[in-house]
Amino acid sequence: MASVAFITSETGGAQLEIFHQCGEKVLARRLQTELKTRGFDVSVSGSHEHGLKTLVKSMMQLAPEEVIELQLNTGMTSEHYRTIGHCLEALRNQGVLLICLDRLENVGNHVDHPQPHDSYIRNLIRQWEDEHQWAKAMSKSDFGASHSNPGAKAPVADPTLCVLNTAFSLGGMQAPQRLFGFSLNENGQSLAGYGWMQ
């Protein structure tokens, strides 16, 4: 794997941001250009999250050429996040490892936060998949052209849903094929999520 791109989200924020973690900034500039051609205002800054470099080192035997983080801002529509996911597909097809990462701060109890194995998130993704299939079928008729999904116009305020919408479109607008999880380490950290297989 030549390079790694993390897609994260933060509540608020004026615009998308690309944080360059290591490497020559080739991938960061390429992604910035791709997003700008689709109408997104995005800046490139230096590293702000050193934990991502540590995560990459623990995942891969060889150091990647470049590591970047695309930080999404909340408040856009689900269609905007899905457009970003489609933009990232080109990078995936060029061998970039794309990881959509929803981070939980290590404070308090996370019982209320939906986990990948919970039915809420899985049913939500299935619903998105059904809606996509329905919209695809209806787009071939005159009826479908005048009846769009009203939920697609509402701003998304939950950072988890921002990341999930992006991952869903990046995964080909279909349900994930894998569910994975890694145990807690000595610091009480764990990693769990979905895998969309190419």
Image (cartoon, rainbow, N blue to C red):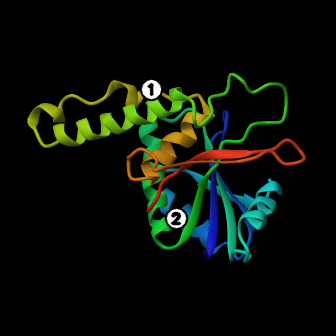
Q: Is residue 15 visible?
A: no
Rendered view: 64 above or below 87: below
Mark sitting earlier along the chain (1/2)? 2
Query: At 35% from the left edge and 39% from the top edge, which residue is drawn?
Result: 129
| Label 2 sits on residue | 33
Question: As shown in the figure, which amino acid type bears the numbered disc 2?
Answer: Thr
Location of residue 126 by image quarter: top left
Which residue matches tag 1?
154
Residue extending furthest toward the front: 183
The quadrant of the rendering that contains the N terminus is bottom right
Callout 1 amino acid: Ala
Of 84 and 125, the residue lying toward us: 125
Q: CA distance from mark 1 to mark 2?
A: 27 Å
Q: At which x and y percent is residue 144?
A: 17, 34
Work out whether residue 95 can be spotted.
yes
The reply, left or right, for residue 18 in relation to residue 195 is: right
What is the residue that sits farthest to the right in this orientation?
186
